[in-house]
Image: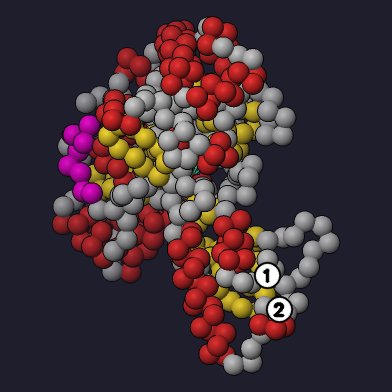
Amino acid sequence: MGRYYQPEIETAPRERILEIQNEKIVKQVRHVYENVPYYRHLMEEKGVTPDDIKGVEDIKKLPFLSKADLRDAYPYGLLGTDLKNCVRIQSTSGTTGRRVVAFYTQKDIELWEDCCARAIVAAGGTDEDVCQVCYGYGLFTGGPGLNGGSHKVGCLTLPMSSGNTDRQIQFMMDLGATILCCTPSYAAYIGESLAEKGYKPEDNKLKAGIFGAEPWTEEMRRNIEKSLGIKAYDIYGLTETSGPGVAFECEEQHGMHINEDHFYAEIIDPDTGEVLPDGEKGELVFTSLDKEAFPLLRYRTRDICVLHREKCSCGRTHVKMSKPMGRSDDMLIIRGVNVFPSQIETVLLNEGYTPNYQILVDRRNNTDTLDINVELPPEQFSDIVSENQAKERALEAAMRNMLGIGPKVHLVGPKSIVRSEGKAVRVIDNRKLHD
Ligand code: DLL
């Protein structure tokens, strides 16, 4: 296997890519219009018909789609094909109210796995490699996506899923894993655990890591590379667009190539929706070009980034996106799990507390921590420590249920959370996630 998984498309001249995109978008829009009444209605509202879309130039005529639409249409409202043609669902982590369920036909899965295979090959993967996948398996897209990509490349795949670090390390050493796939914070933690066990970076056989699903800095990259003795590559994606592999880093390790034959990217001003030119920072919007079961036109990711089209020394011609530099909504990613402050508020209100709370996020020993200070009104305040502790544990359980991760809850006395004169400052995030 060479430097590319699908060289004819990954290094295709720009004109060829545009030709492919133009051809596919016409079909994709028609497919959505004919099969997804929810989106057809949005098009009708905007006065656009499939005949207006003759190529990617016309994508800007189409209405946007947001997470709120996905919620409205839950679970089947955006399905582009008969359920009987679907073979899989995946879903976002946590959340009851905001769960996103994505559907796949067998062809959708093939294309998704191709995208992940491209990422693995770009990180130097071949059929000689042993690829340890410790993203979560199950509903989360990380495990299944990289697992499928690893099979396509022909690597010996270790489907570890996340957690149980001792076992991860044992398999890594005993089976000579050469590629590690997990979140960057878990990679850093594995590096630390190896050192604690007395291993030096040269003791493992790893050569590369494919890390994503959460923001990470160049400083984290350097630390991980040093502690594991590898090259660390970024990979991006979201459940809505199939999962990891929408974009991936090449040997330049400078921006992620977007798989433009499957996804058309735009950057918009998050406030006005206006399309911004390449090189300007704004919200990333994706249009799928050939999805069957869960096609999304102009989906607002809420991730803030920049697109670059300069020639890349790796030979790939696909546009590059910068690392996400933040979000245009209030979503937090904590230990790889997407968390919205509104979910925390919902639990508090459901459990009979007031919405006076503060969310504290930090990163200690490469692991995200989530603490929630919850203010008790005078009538609920108790001097008996054990009573408060029991309430804290009960709230923690309710939060875990809603969020999919367990926070530490601290009940605090009446009026001890500072009232804000403007917008309440609900979230204090002390992690340094962006350079
Ligand atoms: O995190 C898919 C994924 C799995 C990507 C494994 C990479 C590796 P969701 O849970 O739907 O899907 O979360 C998607 O995570 O909108 C970004 O805000 C964030 N995100 C994903 N990759 C990166 C990355 C998966 N490389 C949301 N850097 C996205 C920064 C990322 N943020």
The x, y position of residue 310, in whole percent, is 53, 21
Q: Residue at x 64, y 28 (%)?
A: 268
Q: Is residue 371 above or below residue 189?
A: below
Q: Quadrant of residue 429?
A: bottom right
Residue contact at pointers 2 and 1, CB within 8 angstroms: yes
Q: How is the image coloured?
A: secondary structure
The disc label shown at residue 174, or none: none
Q: For residue 425: magenta? A: no
Question: Is 181 or 246 nearer to us in this picture?
Answer: 246
The residue beneath circle 2 is 377
The x, y position of residue 421, in whole percent, is 83, 61
Q: Residue at x 25, y 53 (%)?
A: 160
The amino acid type of the residue labelled 2 equals Pro
Q: Which residues are magenta?
A: 151-159
Element under disc 1:
loop
Q: Is residue 426 above or below residue 29?
A: below
Q: Quadrant of residue 280?
A: top right
Disc 2 residue: CB within 8 Å of ligand 1 = no
Q: Residue at x 72, y 60 (%)?
A: 425
Earlier in the chain: of badge 2 and badge 1, it is 1
Quadrant in which the N terminus appears? top left
Could you tell whether 318 is left or right of 72 in the image?
A: left
Q: Is residue 223 visible?
A: no
Badge 2: how crowded within 10 Å, few (<14), some, or many (20+)? some
Q: Is residue 424 above or below residue 304?
A: below
The CA span between labels 2 and 1 is: 7 Å
Q: Is residue 37 visible?
A: yes
The amino acid type of the residue labelled 1 equals Thr
Q: Is residue 193 above or below residue 174?
A: below
The x, y position of residue 261, in whole percent, is 41, 19
Question: Is 163 or 172 nearer to us in this picture?
Answer: 163
The residue beneath circle 1 is 354
